Amino acid sequence: MHEVGVRVFDDWTALWNRDLTLAEKIMAPEIRLRYAQPGSDAFDTIRHPKQLAERIDQFHETRPNLRYKAEGEAVVNLTMSDGGPTGLVTRPYLARHDYDGKPHAISGIDMLRLENGLIVEVWSVSGGLAGRAFYND
């Protein structure tokens, strides 16, 4: 199940790197996002994959060269149910983009809750713009 969890997180990362068609493939029809960082209020009312894809697209518009990369080791706690993998996948990530003409890196951690192979809930914590990167590769 570890490989399945890593693959789901890789797809989640690709979605955030603007492969927006993945939203309908990896997200459940109804979702809940729990973003802890300041300024993330726009994610509070998102309930559907299409809304998430639109918000990710808008997010990229204001952050030139934004790229996400999974970092560190994934923690996977999935079991197989009749409809597909169910449980949690958690992994650190690194986001890089240009801000005020300078490169900027922020680390964070996302926890994905899956039901029947689809993401139904996400918890996300990062340092925000004033944050720092824990991984510097």
Image: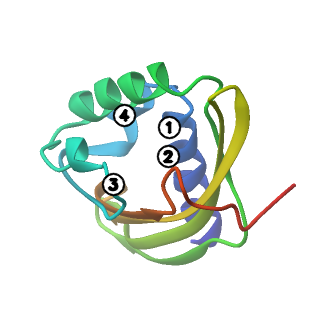
Location of residue 76 (image quadrant):
bottom right
Q: Is mark 3 on a helix, strand or loop?
A: strand
Q: What residue type is labelled 1?
A: Trp
Disc 2 target residue: 12
Q: Do the residues labelled 2 and 3 touch (CB within 8 Å)?
A: yes
- The correct choice, above or below, for 11 with respect to 37 in the image is above
Disc 4 target residue: 23
| Mark 4–mark 1 distance (CA, rounded to whole Å) | 9 Å
Q: Do the residues labelled 1 and 2 touch (CB within 8 Å)?
A: yes
Considering only order in the chain, which callout, 3 or 4, is on the residue closer to the N terminus? Answer: 4
Q: Which amino acid does label 4 sit on?
A: Ala
| Mark 1–mark 2 distance (CA, rounded to whole Å) | 6 Å
Location of residue 51 (image quadrant):
top left
| Viewport quadrant of the N terminus | bottom right
Q: Which mark is residue 16?
A: 1
- Residue farthest toward the top in the current orientation of the protein: 61
Q: What residue type is labelled 3?
A: Ile
Q: Position of residue 94 (x, y in %)?
A: 66, 54
Q: From this viewpoint, is residue 115 visible?
A: no
Between 119 and 47, the one nearer to me in the picture? 47
In the figure, is residue 90 to the left or right of 135?
A: left
Considering only order in the chain, which callout, 1 or 4, is on the residue closer to the N terminus? Answer: 1
